[in-house]
Every structure is written in structure tokens, then in C-alpha cells.
Image: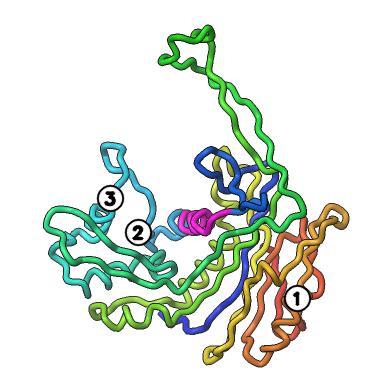
């Protein structure tokens, strides 16, 4: 496998229509103190890992909920031991590190490996992942959240005092009318160098093949994943700015560089790249290429960078 050594900056946009992309523990779409709807980085990472697990089954995803035969979730040491057919307490740290790096999600996002259990001492490993993803902020002009009552086909057998104890139970669900969540991300392969050097011989590092799969999962993972609350959520856009291998430049958060116009054009969302284009012009000699993937049926992009090393693709 060819090692991937370039740094990358970009963003992924998730569209939610009458949906709840990332609920809080009360079932409401998450909001900042200002009232702006947002989603955690974990919500987006989950869809990426779920896509990789389903589509690339030969690339193992370690940090993903799996049930044991008792229908209870695995713990960390149990997940490790089931995958690698060895005991955590018996493996030296360099072997644990090598095993962890054989999992594609660890090579991408890193790992805080702190297992618990009988006889497990001093087996903690911290891997700083190359891929860092920010919280997604709704950049649409409105943050309209609504709730509606739903009825269960069953009554609550514990409801013994209510006059409606023979009736079926009622619940509520909350949705965002329309949202466009922008997640900024960056990739720095150097983050893995030290741990790969310390791991046992044969430890994997981030490869070109990993990046191809990751990019695909970032473009399709949300649309691929389906649930009652996430119906209406889909990948809308991915912007990928890859720097040349020896570049030391950095780019600011893309949340401040890409504007979503408040009015649509023939039903299409209009994304204005003028601020990003200005930033890219400052470091144009350090840019290897720019790729922009978007749903051309529902999205327009304007004020793009110079076409020489920019490609537009359907998501």
C-alpha cells in the first residue's frame, strides 16, 4: 500500500429536511445558546464508520457498537480480544498498537485505548488520529424546530393510576424543518508517525487506499445510513483541498469561508465560494488539487477557484 503524506482541509455538508440529524438526550435537535442548530462530530463519524463497515467489510472498524450473545454491548477489552483472538493483558504495548492500527477507523480517527478488566494494567495506548472533524453548524438562514405527537400501538402496563390506563401511549418527536450542517475537517498524516514507529513491525499507517475509501464514505455515509429520525438527511456537498506534500500552510475553518445564500435559485441552494477562493489564492502554489462534490440536482456553486486544478463532481 502507498503511504498517504499530504495534508488536507475541507468540509462536508449534510442536508436535513423535516428530519433530526443529531438529537440531544431529550430528542430535540441540538442547539447552541444562540439558537443555531448544530451536530456533533460524533454524528458524522458514525455515518462514516457505518458506511465503511457495510461496504468495505475487509477493513475492520473497531470502535463500533456490537452486541454479544446476551444482547449487551461489548466492552473495549472484549471487542479487542474478539477481533484479535488474544488477551489484552498478554499483549505488549507495541503489539496492541500494531493491532489497533490494522483497523481503518483507528488509522483515520485515532484511538484512546484504555481497557478495563482482571489483570489488565498499564495497557493504555493513545493514538492521535490524522482526521479531525469539527461540529457541524447549520448555515441555513433559519433554525425552525417543530414537534409532533405520535401514538404507540401499545398501552403502558405500568400506568395504573391514570384515567387513560387502557389507552395506547402517546409520545413526541421533534424535527428540523430545513438545515444544512457544515462540518469542517482536516487531515494531517504526521499525527500517526510516532506511534507507527513505536509499534511492532508491520504496523499500518494511513494509505492512499484508506483515503479513497474515506472520501467515498464522507460523500455517501449519511445518505447510506437510514433510521426513523434520519429519513430526510443526506450528503449534500464535500469540499476537498489537498496541499502538496511539503506544504506547511494551514487554512481557517470552512464554516467562515463558505456562504449559503438566504434565497434559493429555482429551488436550488446557492453556495458562494468567494471567501474560500480568496484564501486559496493566497496559497495557490501549495495546492495540489481541489475537488468539489455536490448534488447537482439541488445545489448551485458560484465564485469557484481557478478551474486549472479544480474539479466538480456529482456527489
For residue 289, what is the image quadrant? bottom right
Query: In 3D space, how far apart are the residues under numbered discs 3 and 2 (Cα atoms)?
Result: 11 Å
Q: Secondary structure at mark 2?
A: loop
Q: Where in the figure is residue 105, as x and y percent of width and height?
A: 41, 64
Query: In 3D space, how far apart are the residues under numbered discs 1 and 2 (Cα atoms)?
Result: 38 Å
- Numbered tag placed on residue 157 in the rendering: none
Residue at image point 30% right, 83% down: 197
The residue segment tinted magenta is 39-50
> Is residue 211 shown above or below 222?
below
- Numbered tag placed on residue 275 in the rendering: 1
Query: In 3D space, how far apart are the residues under numbered discs 1 and 3 (Cα atoms)?
Result: 45 Å
40 is within the stretch colored magenta: yes
Along the horizontal axis of the image, is 146 left or right of 192? Answer: right
Q: Earlier in the sequence, mark 3 or mark 2?
A: 2
Q: Where in the figure is residue 314, as x and y percent of width and height?
A: 70, 64
Q: Secondary structure at mark 3?
A: loop
- Numbered tag placed on residue 62 in the rendering: 2
Residue at image point 62% right, 64% down: 12
Residue at image point 52% right, 53% down: 43
Q: Which residue is mark 3?
A: 75
Q: Mark 2 packing: few (<14 Cα in 10 Å), some, or many (20+)?
A: many
Q: Total marks drawn?
A: 3
Disc 1 + disc 3, Cβ < 8 Å: no
Disc 1 + disc 2, Cβ < 8 Å: no
Of 156 and 67, nearer the camera is: 156
Of 78 and 51, nearer the camera is: 78
Amino acid at each position: 500500500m502507498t503511504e498517504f503524506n499530504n495534508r488536507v482541509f475541507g468540509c462536508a455538508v449534510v442536508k436535513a429536511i423535516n428530519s433530526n440529524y443529531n438529537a440531544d438526550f431529550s430528542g430535540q435537535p441540538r442547539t447552541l445558546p444562540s439558537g443555531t442548530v448544530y451536530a456533533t462530530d460524533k454524528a458524522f463519524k458514525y455515518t462514516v464508520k457505518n458506511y465503511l463497515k457495510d461496504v468495505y467489510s475487509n477493513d475492520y472498524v473497531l470502535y463500533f457498537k456490537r452486541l454479544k450473545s446476551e444482547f449487551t454491548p461489548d466492552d473495549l477489552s472484549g471487542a479487542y480480544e474478539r477481533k484479535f483472538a488474544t488477551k489484552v493483558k498478554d499483549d505488549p504495548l507495541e503489539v496492541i498498537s500494531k493491532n489497533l492500527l490494522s483497523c481503518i477507523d483507528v488509522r483515520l480517527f485515532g484511538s484512546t485505548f484504555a481497557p478495563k478488566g482482571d489483570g489488565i494494567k498499564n495497557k493504555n495506548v493513545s493514538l492521535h488520529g490524522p482526521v479531525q472533524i469539527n461540529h457541524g453548524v447549520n448555515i441555513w438562514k433559519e433554525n425552525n424546530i417543530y414537534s409532533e405527537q405520535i401514538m404507540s400501538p401499545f398501552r403502558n402496563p405500568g400506568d395504573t393510576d391514570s384515567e387513560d390506563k387502557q389507552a395506547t401511549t402517546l409520545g413526541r418527536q421533534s424535527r428540523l424543518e430545513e438545515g444544512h450542517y457544515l462540518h469542517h475537517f482536516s487531515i494531517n498524516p504526521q499525527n500517526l508517525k510516532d506511534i507507527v514507529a513505536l509499534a511492532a513491525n508491520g504496523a499500518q499507517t494511513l494509505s492512499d487506499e484508506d483515503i479513497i475509501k474515506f472520501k467515498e464514505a464522507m460523500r455517501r455515509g449519511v445518505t447510506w445510513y437510514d433510521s426513523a429520525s434520519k429519513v430526510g438527511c443526506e450528503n449534500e456537498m464535500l469540499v476537498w483541498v489537498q496541499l502538496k506534500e511539503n506544504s506547511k500552510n494551514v487554512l481557517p475553518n470552512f464554516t467562515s469561508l463558505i456562504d449559503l445564500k438566504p434565497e434559493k435559485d429555482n429551488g436550488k441552494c446557492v453556495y458562494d465560494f468567494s471567501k474560500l477562493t480568496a484564501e486559496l489564492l493566497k496559497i495557490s502554489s501549495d495546492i495540489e488539487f481541489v475537488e468539489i462534490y455536490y448534488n447537482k440536482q439541488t445545489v448551485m456553486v458560484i465564485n469557484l477557484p481557478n478551474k486549472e486544478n479544480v474539479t466538480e463532481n456529482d456527489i
